[in-house]
């Protein structure tokens, strides 16, 4: 073997070592008593006399090279070993990464907004069950059995007498059974109807009911409260108009439009070019409803109104499809924050 091929093979062998044991084997292979370099040195005695000094010097160079390569490789492997056991210190002063935090649903935010406006106007909170007696949802509200107006509020029946409420109006009846006039309440909640689903109809949606009963309450009071309420929500230049309508539990009944907050009546995409937005139903509480709860209709009168919360949220935020509220898409829900 010549010095050049010895050098090549010892470089390759040492570079291939990955453990201290392999390094030791390589050392023995080249530097051991019967190792490659030792044998080579002994063989010099058989070379021609004039070649001996050069071969001797070459062997010493290879021995030194082998030792330094072994030492370098040992240091490399040792460093890798150290890194494997390395644990980075915790720096408690670094800024925290942002965690995922929850937020209120846009419908909850709208409930809160509506509630705070009405509370500011003297309405107190009332509540009632979502699983309701047929009596409170229909009968006591002057819907006769078999009356066609029930078809507009087809719902999900638990039994003949028990159903998922179709509106928040049954809370009026429950509240008036328990309290004497004068009374002024608002009743928020979830309601259900057996609807064909589309961009503006969903089987589960939300309403807020308003009710005010006292002596001498008139439609002018209703109009005044609705103006205050809608101006607080949509802007101080909002106007309202009443259109005749029918609800069994109010007489007279009205559909309430507000002037478009976007175009102020000129016509735009939001109001369908009409300048007006249909926003709620209302009316003077029907004498039959007052009688059903033991309030004398000759002494007391009052008004009620029902607001669609989903519709208010859609109009306020420009939401095109009511179904977005219940699909739980975070890309949608994350856009709404408390204001
Ligand atoms: N309860 C009616 C509905 O859901 C709305 C309404 C409430 C109308 C109060 C008049 C008075 O359609």
Image (cartoon, rainbow, N blue to C red):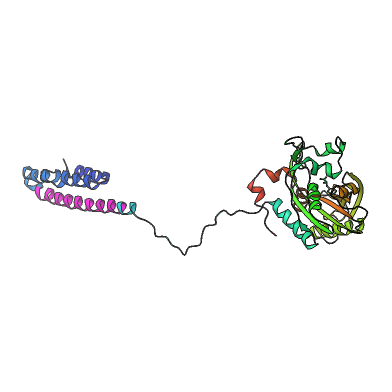
Q: Quadrant of residue 130?
A: top right
Rendering coords of residue 274 (x, y %): 88, 48
Q: Position of residue 19 (x, y in %)?
A: 25, 46
Asked whether the viewer can see residue 128, the reply is yes
The residue lying at 75 percent from left, 39 percent from top is: 163
* The stretch drawn in magenta includes residue 299: no
Of the 4 image quadrants, the one containing the N terminus is top left
Of 291 and 127, nearer the camera is 291
Residue farthest front in this picture:
294
Camera-side residue of 330 and 107: 107
Q: Nearer the viewer, residue 174 or 225?
A: 174
Task: Check residue 68 for magenta coloring.
Answer: yes
Q: Position of residue 241 (x, y in %)?
A: 90, 53
Q: Give the extent of the magenta segment.
A: 52-80
Assign the magenta stretch its main secondary structure. helix
Seen at 19% across and 50% down, the residue is 66
């Amino acid at each position: 073997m010549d010095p050049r091929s010895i050098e090549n093979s010892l470089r390759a062998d040492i570079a291939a070592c990955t453990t201290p044991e392999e390094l030791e084997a390589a050392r023995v292979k080249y530097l051991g008593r019967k190792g490659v370099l030792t044998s080579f040195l002994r063989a010099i005695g058989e070379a021609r006399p004039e070649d001996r000094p050069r071969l001797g010097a070459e062997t010493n160079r290879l021995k030194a090279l082998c030792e330094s390569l072994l030492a370098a490789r040992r240091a490399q492997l040792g460093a890798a070993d150290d890194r494997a056991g390395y644990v980075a210190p915790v720096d408690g002063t670094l800024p925290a990464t942002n965690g995922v935090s929850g937020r209120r649903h846009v419908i909850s935010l709208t409930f809160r907004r509506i509630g705070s406006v009405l509370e500011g106007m003297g309405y107190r909170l009332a509540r009632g069950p979502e699983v309701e007696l047929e009596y409170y949802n229909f009968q006591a509200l002057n819907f006769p059995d078999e009356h066609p107006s029930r078809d507009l509020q087809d719902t999900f029946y638990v039994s003949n007498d028990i159903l998922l409420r179709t509106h928040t109006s049954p809370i009026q009846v429950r509240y008036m059974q328990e309290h004497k006039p004068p009374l002024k309440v608002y009743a928020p909640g979830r309601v259900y109807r057996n609807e064909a689903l589309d961009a503006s109809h969903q089987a589960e949606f939300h309403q807020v009911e308003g009710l005010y009963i006292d002596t001498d309450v008139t439609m002018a009071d209703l109009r005044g409260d609705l103006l205050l309420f809608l101006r607080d929500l949509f802007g101080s230049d909002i106007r309202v108009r009443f259109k005749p309508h029918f609800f069994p539990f109010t007489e007279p009944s009205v559909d309430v439009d507000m002037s478009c907050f976007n175009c102020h009546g000129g016509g735009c995409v939001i109001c369908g070019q009409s300048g007006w937005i249909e926003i709620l139903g209302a009316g003077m509480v029907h004498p039959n409803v007052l009688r059903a709860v033991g309030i004398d209709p000759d002494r007391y009168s009052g008004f009620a109104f029902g607001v669609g919360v989903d519709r208010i949220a859609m109009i306020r935020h420009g939401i095109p499809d009511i179904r977005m509220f219940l699909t739980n898409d975070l890309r949608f829900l994350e856009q709404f924050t408390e204001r």
